[in-house]
Image: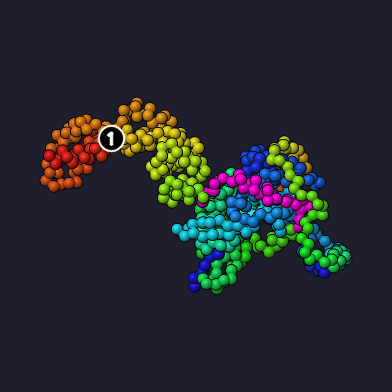
C-alpha cells in the first residue's frame, strides 16, 4: 500500500504540485495499480536471475569516433534564456 | 578518549576517449560553450543513447589493474534528481549491476604495507558545468562536459589516517595514468575525489556517523580537508554532541569545511534500470584480450627496478612515478650500463632542472643517448664528476652532445701526472706559509691545497690523482 504522504513525497521529488483532492485521487489510483502489479509476486521466481530489460539483446556499441555536433546556435534554439553561448538559469548556489 | 578515523574515498576519473559515453560529440577540453553538444547530450526527448565501446574497454582495464571481479553482465540505471547542469533530470549511471566489484590497491605508508579494498567500479556520464554570476541572480550552463565518460571508483572504508588516504589516492592516480585511460589532471577535474569520514572510539567495531567531503582539487587539499574534519568531529564528540550525516564542502582559502545540505532527501534518487540502454555482456575472451594490452603497472615496475638494477626502493619509487620517466631511465641504463649512476643523474640533475621549470620528462632536451654518453665519459675518466655537472648544464641548455661541449670548452680531465705535478708545484710555491703550517701539523690545510690545484686547472684535474700526488709531494 502507498500512503498519501508517500504520494506527496514523490510528487515533491518530481517538482509536481497537487491539490489535496488530486493527492487523494492519485493515492487511490496508484494503489489500484500496485495491487494489480502485485499479482506478479505470486509467480515463483526462485533461481531466476533478475531481469533489467524485456528484450533479449546485448552489447549495442558505437566506435569512439567523433561526429560533428549540432553547433551552439541550434543547441540554444529552445533555451528560454541565454547569455554568452550558455543557457541562463536562475542562480543556484549550494 | 582516543578516536580512530575511518575513511573511504570515492574517485571520479574522466576517461580519455575521443567521444562522449552515449553520443559522438567530442570530449575535448576548452571548446566554446555548448559547441560540443547534440540532441542526446542535451537531453532532448525521443533520442537514443548508444554506448561507446572504448568506455567499456577502459573500465575493464582499470578493473583488471585493481584486481576486481568483472561482472559478466552489467547494466545502466537512471539516477533521478534535478539540477541545472543535468539536462535530462537524471544521470545515466550503474547502480545494482556495476561493471566491477571487490578489488584492491596495495599502498605503503611510512614503510608499512596495507591493502585497501575497492568496493566497486562503475561507468557513468558527467554533468555539465555551471558558472555563477557574481553581479546578477543568474547561473550559466555549459553542456560540453555533459555526457563525458567517467568511472567512479569506490573504496572500502579501510583507511585509518590521512596519510593512508593520500597514499591510496596517489596509487590510484598513478595506475589510471599508467593505463593511459585518464590524464589525471586534478585542476581541470579529470580526477576528482570525495571522501567519507567518521570517527569512533579506538577499539570500537561500529562505525560512527560520517560526513561526506567534496570540492578538494589536489592531493594536499584532500589531506587537509580530512585533517580538519577529524578535528571538527573530535571536538563535537568530546563535547558530548552528535555528528550530523551531511555533505560538507572544503573551502581552500579558509582551510575549513562548510555544511552543504542535509543528505536525507538529496539521497532519494529513485534509481531504476535505464530502458534505453541494453545490458553489457563481457565474455572471458574479451577480458583476456584487454588483459593482453595492460602495461607493466607501477608497483610491478618498482619491484623489478629494485631487483634488476639493484637500486634502492626509494630510487625505484621516484623513477617509476610516470611511464615516460621510467622509460627514460631504462633507456639510459641500457645505453650506459650503470644503473646506480644513471639513477643519481636522472633523480638529481635531470629532475631538478625539469621540476624547477615545471616541465615533463618528454620535453627534456637531454635525451637518454646523450646522458648515457656523458655517464660513459665520466666512467672512462675523460671528465671528472664535477666537470660533468658543468657539461650537463650546457647539454640541458643547448641540447648539444657532451663530446662536442667537452672538446669546445677544453674540459677533458687532466690525468697526466707530469702536468698535474707541475700544477701542484706551482700551488705549493705560491703558498709557502700554508705549507709550513701544514708540515707543523695543521692537517686541515690539505683540502686547501686540493682546492687551489682544482682552481688552477679549472676543475679539470683528476681529483684522485691530485690527492695521491699532493700527499706524496707534501711528505717530501
Q: Which residues are magenta?
A: B272-299
- Compared to residue B19, the image places residue B252 above or below, namely below
Look at 26% across and 33% down and name the residue there.
Answer: B415
Queried whether the magenta region covers residue A23, the answer comes back as no
Residue in the image at 24% along x and 37% along y: B465
Residue A57 place in picture, x, y as percent? 79, 50
Which quarter of the figure is the C terminus of chain A placed in?
Answer: bottom right
Q: Position of residue A3 (x, y in %)?
A: 81, 69
Q: Position of residue A12 (x, y in %)?
A: 77, 61
Q: Which of B1 and A41 lies nearest the eye of the viewer? A: A41
Residue at 73% x, 42% y: name it.
A62
The quarter of the picture where residue B448 lies is top left
- Is residue B432 positioned above or below B7 on the image? above
Helix, strand or loop under label 1: loop
User: In the image, is residue B345 above or below residue B410?
Assistant: below
- The residue most toward the top is B408
Residue B119 falls in image quadrant: bottom right
When the figure is inspected, residue B191 is found, relative to residue B424, above or below; the finding is below
Q: Is residue B476 left or right of residue B46?
A: left
The residue wearing badge 1 is B459
Magenta stretch holds residue B285: yes
Q: Where residue B28 sits: x, y (%)?
A: 64, 39
Q: Quadrant of the N terminus of chain A?
A: bottom right
Asked if residue B140 can be seen in this view, the reply is: no
Q: Is residue B56 left or right of residue B168?
A: right
Observer-nearest of B435 and B464: B464
Observer-nearest of B455 and B302: B302
Residue closer to the observer: B301 or B93: B301
Q: Is residue A7 left or right of residue B472?
A: right
Q: Quadrant of residue B19?
A: top right
Give the residue at x 79% y 52%: B275
Q: Residues within 10 Å of mark 1 (few under 14, many from 20)?
A: many
Amino acid at each position: 500500500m502507498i500512503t498519501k504522504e508517500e504520494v506527496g513525497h514523490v510528487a515533491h521529488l518530481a517538482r509536481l504540485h497537487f491539490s489535496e483532492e488530486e493527492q487523494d485521487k492519485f493515492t487511490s489510483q496508484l494503489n489500484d495499480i500496485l495491487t494489480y502489479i502485485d499479482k506478479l509476486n505470486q509467480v515463483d521466481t526462485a533461481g531466476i536471475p533478475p531481469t533489467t530489460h524485456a528484450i533479449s539483446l546485448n552489447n549495442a556499441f558505437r566506435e569512439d569516433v567523433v561526429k560533428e555536433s549540432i553547433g551552439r546556435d541550434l543547441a540554444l534554439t529552445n533555451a528560454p534564456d541565454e547569455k554568452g553561448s550558455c543557457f541562463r538559469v536562475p542562480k543556484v548556489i549550494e | 578518549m582516543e578516536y580512530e578515523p575511518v575513511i573511504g574515498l570515492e574517485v571520479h576519473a574522466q576517461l580519455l576517449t575521443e567521444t562522449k559515453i552515449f553520443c559522438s560529440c567530442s570530449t575535448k577540453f576548452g571548446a566554446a560553450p555548448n559547441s560540443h553538444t547534440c540532441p542526446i547530450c542535451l537531453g532532448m526527448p525521443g533520442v537514443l543513447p548508444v554506448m561507446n565501446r572504448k568506455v567499456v574497454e577502459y573500465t575493464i582495464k582499470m578493473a583488471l589493474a585493481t584486481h576486481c571481479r568483472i561482472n559478466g553482465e552489467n547494466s545502466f540505471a537512471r539516477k533521478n534528481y534535478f539540477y541545472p547542469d543535468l539536462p535530462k533530470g537524471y544521470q545515466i549511471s550503474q547502480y545494482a549491476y556495476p561493471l566491477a566489484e571487490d578489488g584492491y590497491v596495495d599502498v605503503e605508508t611510512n614503510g608499512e604495507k596495507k591493502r585497501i579494498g575497492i568496493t566497486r567500479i562503475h561507468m557513468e556520464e558527467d554533468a555539465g558545468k555551471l558558472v555563477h554570476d557574481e553581479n546578477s541572480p543568474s547561473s550559466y550552463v555549459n553542456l560540453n562536459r555533459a555526457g563525458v565518460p567517467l568511472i567512479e571508483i569506490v573504496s572500502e572504508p579501510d583507511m585509518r589516517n590521512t596519510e593512508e588516504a593520500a597514499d591510496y589516492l596517489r596509487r590510484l592516480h598513478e595506475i589510471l595514468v599508467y593505463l593511459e585511460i585518464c590524464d589525471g589532471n586534478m585542476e581541470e577535474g579529470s580526477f576528482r575525489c570525495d571522501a567519507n569520514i567518521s570517527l569512533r572510539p579506538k577499539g570500537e567495531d561500529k562505525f560512527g556517523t560520517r560526513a561526506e567531503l567534496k570540492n578538494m582539487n589536489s592531493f594536499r587539499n584532500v589531506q587537509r580537508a580530512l585533517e580538519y574534519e577529524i578535528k571538527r568531529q573530535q571536538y563535537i564528540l568530546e563535547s558530548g554532541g552528535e555528528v550530523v550525516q551531511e555533505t560538507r564542502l572544503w573551502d581552500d582559502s579558509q582551510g575549513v569545511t562548510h555544511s552543504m545540505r542535509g543528505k536525507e532527501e538529496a539521497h532519494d534518487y529513485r534509481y531504476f534500470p535505464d530502458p534505453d540502454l541494453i545490458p553489457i555482456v563481457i565474455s572471458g575472451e574479451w577480458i583476456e584480450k584487454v588483459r593482453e594490452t595492460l602495461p607493466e603497472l607501477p608497483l610491478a615496475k618498482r619491484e623489478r627496478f629494485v631487483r634488476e638494477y639493484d637500486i634502492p626502493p626509494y630510487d625505484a619509487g621516484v623513477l617509476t612515478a610516470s611511464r615516460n620517466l621510467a622509460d627514460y631511465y631504462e633507456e639510459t641504463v641500457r645505453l650506459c650500463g650503470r644503473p646506480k649512476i644513471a639513477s643519481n643523474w636522472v633523480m638529481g640533475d635531470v629532475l631538478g632542472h625539469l621540476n624547477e621549470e615545471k616541465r615533463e620528462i618528454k620535453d627534456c632536451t637531454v635525451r637518454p643517448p646523450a646522458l648515457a654518453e656523458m655517464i660513459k665519459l665520466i666512467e672512462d675518466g675523460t671528465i671528472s664528476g664535477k666537470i660533468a655537472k658543468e657539461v650537463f648544464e650546457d647539454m640541458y641548455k643547448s641540447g648539444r652532445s657532451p663530446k662536442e661541449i667537452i672538446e669546445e670548452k677544453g674540459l677533458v680531465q687532466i690525468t697526466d701526472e707530469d702536468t698535474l705535478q707541475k700544477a701542484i708545484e706551482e700551488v705549493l710555491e705560491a703558498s709557502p706559509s700554508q705549507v709550513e703550517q701544514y708540515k707543523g701539523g695543521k692537517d686541515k690545510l690539505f683540502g686547501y691545497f686540493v682546492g687551489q690545484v682544482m682552481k688552477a686547472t679549472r676543475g679539470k684535474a683528476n681529483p684522485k690523482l691530485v690527492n695521491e700526488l699532493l700527499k706524496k709531494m707534501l711528505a717530501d
